[in-house]
C-alpha cells in the first residue's frame, strides 16, 4: 500500500494544469468482486476521456494522458493486492495511485487542480491509526481507519530477527535459521527464544537490536505523521520495542498475544478498541480549549477569518463539518474572500481549502458532523498566534 502522507497531499495540492484528472473508486480485497474492479475503472476512464475531450483535448491527447491508468486494467497482480479504495491522479506529466483503507464512492473530476476532499478523512486527527505487529519471525504494519484496515508495504524494514541480524552475527545463523514447523499454522518459522516472558540478557540484546533496525526502517514510513501507533506482540516484547522507539505517538497500551495467530481484521478490531478512547479524549480536550478561547482573538468560527489564517499556517486546530460545501474564492494577494450561494466558475470549497491548508502546515483537523462543530458553524478554529 502506498501511504498517503501530508507530503503526498502537498504534492497533489500544488499540482496545477489545464487537465488534472482525479479518479476515486471502491475496490475489493478478495472474492469474485475483484473481477469487477477493472471493469469499474475502465468505465471511469471512459468518463474521464469524454470530459477531457469536452474541455478541448483531442482524443489522442486524452488517451495519452490516461495511458498510465489504462495499463492497470490488464495488470493482474495489481488487482490481487487491493485495499478498500483506489485513488488515481493523472496529468500529462505525472500519475499517482493510492490503495487506501477507505471505501470511496465512484467519482471522476477533471479540473485545473486535483480534487482531494475525499482523502481528508484519512488525514484528520481521528482519521487513522497504525498497528505494528511484532514477533521474532514477522513484522507487519497495518494502517486502519475506524471501519477498515490495510497492510502497508515495508521495503526497508527487516522481516524477522534472522533477517535483521544476519550480517551482525554470522555465527548465529545456524541458530536463527533452525527450522521448525508451526503446528497447523503458516509453515516454517525461525526457532523461537526460550522462556515465557523471561528473556536472557543476550536474547534481549538481540531483540533490541532487531527492533532498533525495525524502528529505523519505519522512520520514513511514519515521518510527518501524528497518527497513534499501537504495538501488538507477546507481553515481554512490547517494552523492548518501547525502548527502541522514537515515534512520539506510540501508545502505552498494546495488543498482547502472538500477532502471527491474528488476521489483519482481528488486529484492527483490537487496535481500534485501544485507540477510540484516545481519539475521543483528544477531541473533547480540543473542543474545551476552543470554548475557553473563543471570546479572545485566539479562536474563531468566522470563515472569513479562518481561511486566510489557515493559508498562512496560523491554525493549530480546525473543526470542519463533513458533508457541507461553502463555495467561494480566496485571494491571497489581498486576503479577501468572496462567498457564493452556488458554485461559480473558479470557485472552490472553502471548507476544503481551510482543512487542506491546516494539514499542510502541521495543524490538527477534526472532521465532524455539522451538529458537532462548536458554535454550530461550518468551521471553527484555534489559532497558534
Image (spheres, rainbow, N blue to C red):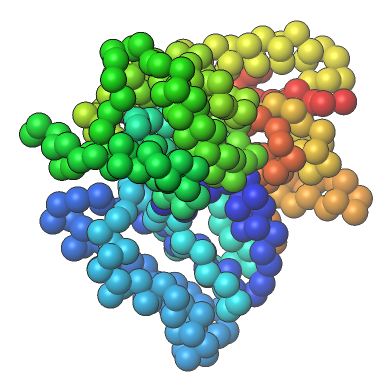
Q: Left or right? Give the position of 35 relative to 126.
A: left
Q: Left or right? Give the position of 140 relative to 373.
A: left
Viewport quadrant of the C terminus: top right
Residue most extreme to the left:
184
Residue at 58% across, 16% down: 282
Q: Is residue 166 above or below residue 288?
A: below
Give x and y (percent) for residue 120.
Answer: 54, 42
Q: Left or right? Give the position of 296 relative to 379.
A: right
Give x and y (percent) for residue 274.
Answer: 41, 16
Residue at 71% across, 12% down: 289
Number of labelled discs?
0
Name the residue nearer the viewer: 204 or 136: 204
Name the residue nearer the viewer: 132 or 268: 132
Q: Quadrant of residue 361?
A: top right
Name the residue nearer the viewer: 49 or 162: 162
Residue at 56% across, 21% down: 243
Residue most extreme to the right:
334
Give x and y (percent) for residue 255.
Answer: 36, 19
Residue at 25% across, 59% down: 80
Q: Residue 364, can we see it?
A: yes
Amino acid at each position: 500500500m502506498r501511504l498517503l502522507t501530508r507530503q503526498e497531499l502537498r504534492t497533489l495540492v500544488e499540482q496545477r494544469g489545464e487537465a488534472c484528472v482525479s479518479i476515486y473508486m471502491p475496490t475489493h480485497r478478495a472474492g469474485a468482486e475483484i473481477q469487477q474492479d477493472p471493469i469499474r475503472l475502465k468505465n471511469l476512464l471512459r468518463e474521464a476521456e469524454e470530459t477531457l475531450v469536452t474541455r478541448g483535448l483531442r482524443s489522442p491527447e486524452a488517451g495519452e494522458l490516461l495511458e498510465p491508468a489504462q495499463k492497470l486494467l490488464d495488470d493482474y497482480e495489481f488487482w490481487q493486492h487491493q485495499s478498500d479504495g483506489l485513488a488515481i491522479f493523472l496529468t500529462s506529466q505525472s500519475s499517482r495511485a493510492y490503495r487506501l483503507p477507505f471505501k470511496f464512492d465512484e467519482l471522476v473530476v477533471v479540473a485545473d487542480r486535483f480534487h482531494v476532499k475525499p482523502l481528508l478523512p484519512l488525514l484528520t486527527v481521528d482519521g487513522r491509526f497504525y498497528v505494528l505487529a511484532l514477533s521474532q519471525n514477522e513484522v507487519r504494519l497495518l494502517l486502519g481507519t475506524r471501519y477498515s484496515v490495510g497492510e502497508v508495504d515495508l521495503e526497508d524494514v527487516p522481516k524477522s530477527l534472522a533477517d535483521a541480524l544476519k550480517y551482525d552475527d554470522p555465527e548465529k545463523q545456524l541458530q536463527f535459521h533452525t527450522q521448525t514447523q508451526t503446528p497447523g499454522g503458516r509453515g516454517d518459522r525461525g526457532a523461537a527464544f526460550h522462556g515465557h516472558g523471561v528473556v536472557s540478557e543476550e536474547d534481549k540484546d538481540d531483540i533490541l537490536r532487531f527492533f532498533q533496525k525495525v524502528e529505523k526502517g519505519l522512520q520514513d514510513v511514519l515521518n510527518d505523521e501524528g497518527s497513534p501507533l499501537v504495538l501488538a506482540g507477546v507481553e515481554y516484547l512490547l517494552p523492548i520495542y518501547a525502548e527502541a522507539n522514537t515515534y512520539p505517538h506510540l501508545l502505552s497500551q498494546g495488543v498482547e498475544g502472538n500477532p502471527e495467530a491474528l488476521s489483519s481484521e482481528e488486529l484492527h478490531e483490537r487496535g481500534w478498541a485501544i485507540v477510540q478512547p484516545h481519539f475521543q479524549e483528544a477531541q473533547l480536550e480540543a473542543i474545551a480549549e476552543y470554548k475557553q478561547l473563543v471570546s479572545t482573538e485566539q479562536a474563531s468560527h468566522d470563515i472569513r477569518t479562518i481561511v486566510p489564517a489557515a493559508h498562512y499556517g496560523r491554525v493549530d486546530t480546525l473543526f470542519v463539518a463533513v458533508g457541507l460545501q461553502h463555495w467561494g474564492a480566496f485571494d491571497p494577494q489581498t486576503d479577501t474572500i468572496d462567498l457564493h450561494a452556488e458554485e461559480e466558475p473558479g470557485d472552490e470549497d472553502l471548507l476544503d481549502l481551510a482543512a487542506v491548508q491546516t494539514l499542510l502546515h502541521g495543524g490538527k483537523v477534526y472532521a465532524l458532523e455539522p451538529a458537532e462543530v462548536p458554535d454550530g458553524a461550518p468551521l471553527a478554529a484555534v489559532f497558534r498566534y
